[in-house]
Image: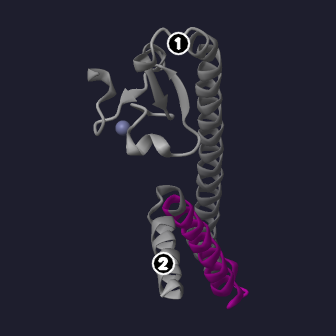
Amino acid sequence: MTFLRRCAGFLLALSEWFRDPYIGGLSMFATLTLGGCVAIAMAWRGAARTVDVPLQTPWVMSGGLTGVALVGVGLSLFAAQVRRKQAARRRRTLDSMLDQALVVLAAPSLSADAESDSAMVIAGAGVYHSRDCRYAQRRGLKRMKRSSARVLKIRPCKVCRPSQR
Ligand SMILES: [Zn+2]
Protein backbone atom coordinates (compact mmCIF):
# COMPACT_ATOMS: atom_id res chain seq x y z
CA MET A 1 0.00 0.00 0.00
CA THR A 2 2.69 2.45 0.99
CA PHE A 3 4.72 1.32 -2.02
CA LEU A 4 1.80 2.07 -4.36
CA ARG A 5 1.28 5.42 -2.71
CA ARG A 6 4.95 6.20 -3.09
CA CYS A 7 4.82 5.26 -6.78
CA ALA A 8 1.78 7.50 -7.31
CA GLY A 9 3.57 10.35 -5.57
CA PHE A 10 6.60 9.87 -7.78
CA LEU A 11 4.49 9.85 -10.96
CA LEU A 12 2.66 12.96 -9.81
CA ALA A 13 5.94 14.76 -9.15
CA LEU A 14 7.23 13.67 -12.56
CA SER A 15 4.13 14.94 -14.40
CA GLU A 16 4.33 18.22 -12.51
CA TRP A 17 8.01 18.47 -13.45
CA PHE A 18 7.12 18.13 -17.14
CA ARG A 19 4.27 20.64 -16.82
CA ASP A 20 6.75 23.24 -15.54
CA PRO A 21 7.09 25.87 -18.30
CA TYR A 22 10.78 26.17 -17.43
CA ILE A 23 11.40 22.51 -18.30
CA GLY A 24 9.19 22.84 -21.40
CA GLY A 25 11.19 25.83 -22.62
CA LEU A 26 14.50 24.13 -21.93
CA SER A 27 13.52 21.00 -23.84
CA MET A 28 12.25 23.11 -26.77
CA PHE A 29 15.52 25.03 -26.98
CA ALA A 30 17.51 21.80 -26.64
CA THR A 31 15.46 20.40 -29.55
CA LEU A 32 16.28 23.50 -31.63
CA THR A 33 19.99 23.03 -30.91
CA LEU A 34 19.77 19.34 -31.73
CA GLY A 35 17.95 20.11 -34.99
CA GLY A 36 20.76 22.53 -35.88
CA CYS A 37 23.34 19.81 -35.26
CA VAL A 38 21.37 17.41 -37.48
CA ALA A 39 21.21 20.06 -40.26
CA ILE A 40 24.97 20.58 -40.02
CA ALA A 41 25.57 16.82 -40.18
CA MET A 42 23.29 16.50 -43.21
CA ALA A 43 25.05 19.39 -44.94
CA TRP A 44 28.37 17.73 -44.20
CA ARG A 45 27.17 14.44 -45.66
CA GLY A 46 25.79 16.14 -48.76
CA ALA A 47 28.90 18.22 -49.35
CA ALA A 48 31.22 15.26 -48.77
CA ARG A 49 29.50 13.23 -51.50
CA THR A 50 31.19 15.23 -54.21
CA VAL A 51 34.44 17.11 -54.77
CA ASP A 52 32.70 19.48 -57.18
CA VAL A 53 32.57 22.83 -55.37
CA PRO A 54 29.55 24.25 -57.26
CA LEU A 55 27.60 21.15 -56.13
CA GLN A 56 28.84 21.47 -52.52
CA THR A 57 27.84 25.12 -52.19
CA PRO A 58 24.04 24.57 -51.95
CA TRP A 59 24.57 21.98 -49.20
CA VAL A 60 26.78 24.32 -47.22
CA MET A 61 24.54 27.35 -47.79
CA SER A 62 21.18 25.77 -47.02
CA GLY A 63 22.12 23.03 -44.57
CA GLY A 64 25.24 24.39 -42.90
CA LEU A 65 24.17 27.98 -42.35
CA THR A 66 20.67 26.97 -41.23
CA GLY A 67 22.23 24.51 -38.81
CA VAL A 68 24.60 27.09 -37.36
CA ALA A 69 21.74 29.59 -36.99
CA LEU A 70 19.54 26.99 -35.25
CA VAL A 71 22.32 26.01 -32.85
CA GLY A 72 23.03 29.67 -32.06
CA VAL A 73 19.39 30.55 -31.43
CA GLY A 74 18.76 27.37 -29.44
CA LEU A 75 21.80 27.83 -27.18
CA SER A 76 21.19 31.54 -26.53
CA LEU A 77 17.51 30.95 -25.66
CA PHE A 78 18.57 28.07 -23.42
CA ALA A 79 21.02 30.35 -21.59
CA ALA A 80 18.42 33.13 -21.32
CA GLN A 81 15.89 30.71 -19.84
CA VAL A 82 18.40 29.51 -17.23
CA ARG A 83 19.30 33.12 -16.33
CA ARG A 84 15.61 34.02 -15.95
CA LYS A 85 15.07 31.07 -13.63
CA GLN A 86 18.06 32.09 -11.49
CA ALA A 87 16.82 35.70 -11.32
CA ALA A 88 13.38 34.50 -10.24
CA ARG A 89 14.94 32.35 -7.51
CA ARG A 90 16.97 35.33 -6.25
CA ARG A 91 13.81 37.47 -6.18
CA ARG A 92 11.93 34.79 -4.23
CA THR A 93 14.76 34.51 -1.69
CA LEU A 94 14.82 38.28 -1.29
CA ASP A 95 11.04 38.38 -0.85
CA SER A 96 11.08 35.75 1.87
CA MET A 97 13.97 37.53 3.61
CA LEU A 98 11.96 40.76 3.53
CA ASP A 99 8.93 38.93 4.96
CA GLN A 100 11.03 37.50 7.78
CA ALA A 101 12.54 40.91 8.48
CA LEU A 102 9.06 42.40 8.70
CA VAL A 103 7.99 39.74 11.18
CA VAL A 104 11.09 40.36 13.30
CA LEU A 105 10.56 44.12 13.19
CA ALA A 106 6.92 43.77 14.17
CA ALA A 107 7.59 41.25 16.95
CA PRO A 108 8.64 43.50 19.90
CA SER A 109 5.49 45.58 19.74
CA LEU A 110 3.32 42.48 19.89
CA SER A 111 4.32 40.21 22.71
CA ALA A 112 5.57 42.94 25.04
CA ASP A 113 2.33 44.77 25.45
CA ALA A 114 -0.34 42.19 24.92
CA GLU A 115 -3.13 44.65 25.52
CA SER A 116 -5.71 41.94 25.71
CA ASP A 117 -5.40 38.25 25.04
CA SER A 118 -8.24 38.29 22.54
CA ALA A 119 -6.23 40.61 20.27
CA MET A 120 -3.55 37.94 19.86
CA VAL A 121 -3.65 35.74 16.78
CA ILE A 122 -1.55 32.90 15.39
CA ALA A 123 0.01 33.89 12.08
CA GLY A 124 1.75 32.03 9.28
CA ALA A 125 3.24 33.56 6.15
CA GLY A 126 -0.06 34.27 4.46
CA VAL A 127 -2.96 33.66 6.87
CA TYR A 128 -3.61 34.36 10.54
CA HIS A 129 -5.92 32.40 12.84
CA SER A 130 -7.58 32.68 16.20
CA ARG A 131 -5.77 30.66 18.86
CA ASP A 132 -8.36 27.89 18.97
CA CYS A 133 -8.47 27.31 15.20
CA ARG A 134 -7.45 23.81 14.14
CA TYR A 135 -5.16 25.32 11.49
CA ALA A 136 -3.35 27.32 14.17
CA GLN A 137 -1.85 24.11 15.60
CA ARG A 138 0.71 23.78 12.79
CA ARG A 139 4.37 24.25 13.46
CA GLY A 140 6.21 27.42 12.46
CA LEU A 141 3.31 29.78 13.18
CA LYS A 142 3.90 32.81 15.39
CA ARG A 143 1.84 34.59 18.03
CA MET A 144 1.27 38.24 17.27
CA LYS A 145 -1.22 41.03 17.66
CA ARG A 146 -4.04 41.14 15.17
CA SER A 147 -3.07 44.69 14.23
CA SER A 148 0.48 43.51 13.44
CA ALA A 149 -0.88 40.76 11.24
CA ARG A 150 -2.86 43.40 9.37
CA VAL A 151 0.22 45.61 9.03
CA LEU A 152 2.09 42.62 7.58
CA LYS A 153 -0.78 42.17 5.10
CA ILE A 154 -1.52 38.68 6.42
CA ARG A 155 -5.09 37.65 5.56
CA PRO A 156 -7.56 36.38 8.18
CA CYS A 157 -8.43 32.68 8.06
CA LYS A 158 -11.76 31.96 6.38
CA VAL A 159 -12.51 29.07 8.72
CA CYS A 160 -12.11 30.66 12.16
CA ARG A 161 -12.66 34.29 11.02
CA PRO A 162 -10.33 35.90 13.56
CA SER A 163 -11.10 39.40 12.25
CA GLN A 164 -14.70 39.26 13.50
CA ARG A 165 -13.99 38.41 17.12
ZN1 LIG B 1 -8.15 29.58 11.20
In the picture of the structure, the residue carrying the numbered disc 2 is: 11
Q: Is residue 61 above or below residue 90?
A: below
Residue 27 magenta-highlighted: yes
Residue depicted at x 46% and y 66%: 16
Q: Position of residue 65 (x, y in %)?
A: 62, 64
**Label 1 packing within 10 angstroms: few (<14), some (14-19), many (20+):** few
Q: Is residue 54 visible?
A: no
Between 32 and 92, the one nearer to me in the picture: 92
Residue depicted at x 48% and y 59%: 20
Q: Position of residue 143 (x, y in %)?
A: 54, 27
What amino acid type is highlighted by mark number 2?
Leu
- Asked whether mark 1 and ligand 1 are closer than 8 Å, the reply comes as no
Query: Mark 1 near mark 2, Cβ–Cβ under 8 Å?
Result: no
Q: Which residues are magenta?
A: 24-53
Residue 117 magenta-highlighted: no
What amino acid type is highlighted by mark number 1?
Ala
**Rendered image: mark on residue 114:** 1
Q: Is residue 101 above or below residue 77?
A: above
Residue 133: quarter of image: top left
**Rendered image: mark on residue 125:** none
Q: Is residue 98 visible?
A: yes
Q: Position of residue 149 (x, y in %)?
A: 46, 21
> Left of 66 or right of it: where is 154?
left
Q: Nearer the viewer, mark 1 or mark 2?
A: 1
Distance from the alpha carbon under mark 1 to that under mark 2? 49 Å
Quadrant of ligand 1: it is top left
Residue closest to the far bottom = 49
Residue 34: quarter of image: bottom right
